[in-house]
Amino acid sequence: MRALHQMRAEPALHAPLLSAHALRRLAILLAAGALTILWLGRYTDLDLVLADAVFDAQRRVFPWRDTWLTVTFNHVIVKQLLMLLAVGIVGYALVDAWRPRAALGALGRVQLRIVALAAILVPAVTSTLKHLSASHCPWDLVRYGGEQPYVRLFGAFPADTLPGQCLPAGHASSALWLVALAVCWLPQRPSRARAAALLAIGAGATVGYLQQLRGAHFMTHTLWSIWIACTIVVALIASLQGRPS
């Protein structure tokens, strides 16, 4: 009876985490999301409106820039806790790759590897793109007491302008790799996986918003980080779900 149960359960272990139809639908959503974020940053003033709302024009400062909540809690404590979690998951994945744990199973192994790779790739890719970008942080701009001009995405910078290295939002990516935890409920419970992904996006957006309060990023910087994280996770699922573990 136990062997029969295992035989019946085996196909579920090798079922794809996401069907081809689901992957195509996510690809369309990601493409639409990229176009939307690009439009917001390139053709609207929403970034400036939101930054203006948290900037004290009379004192020429962002009041939340040096508070305990935005600096010590958000930028230090939260970041360190998430880094410890990421290191633990990556370490577990490495140990399993060296000595596969039978209790993990084929499905669990694929899920673990996706989460571990996301914990590495999401912050790494975001940080790399940030250091290659010319866009400035709000607190660097003349509009907010800095010295640099405001230039929209893909706009032309004056010849003497130094690269801002502020797009996408790096700190938000320290939480956005958590989107990958959604695979823990795939393929059996897609509604729970969706809820987990949305919670992780909400966590990353919150971390990013606290940086926006400081004047460290515009809203679209955080939105691009969310898009990058989701794209990486979907790409990892598509790449790894069909491979033998």
Image (cartoon, rainbow, N blue to C red):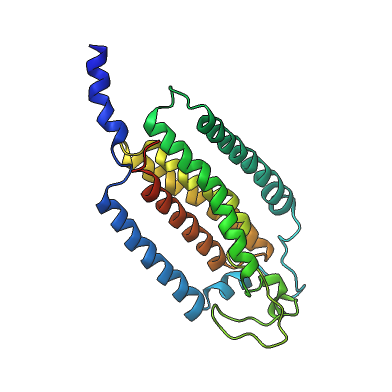
Considering the image in quadrants, where does the C terminus appear? top left
Q: Is residue 119 visible?
A: yes
Considering the image in quadrants, where does the N terminus appear? top left
Residue toward you, 161 or 49: 161
Q: Is residue 66 above or below residue 16?
A: below
Residue pictured at 62% horizontal, 59% vertical: 127
> 217 left or right of 42?
right
**Residue 50 coordinates in the image, percent (x, y):** 57, 70
Residue pictured at 67% horizontal, 64% vertical: 216
Q: Is residue 74 above or below residue 38?
A: above
Q: Is residue 233 above or below residue 59?
A: above
Residue toward you, 20 or 181: 20
Q: Is residue 57 visible?
A: no
> 217 left or right of 233?
right
Question: How many numbered discs?
Answer: 0
Residue pictured at 43% horizontal, 33% vertical: 109
Residue pictured at 41% horizontal, 38% vertical: 110
**Residue 209 coordinates in the image, percent (x, y):** 59, 58
Residue that lies at the very extreme toward the top in this rendered image: 1
**Residue 197 coordinates in the image, percent (x, y):** 43, 47
**Residue 84 coordinates in the image, percent (x, y):** 64, 38
Residue toward you, 126 or 216: 126
The image quadrant that residue 150 belongs to is: bottom right
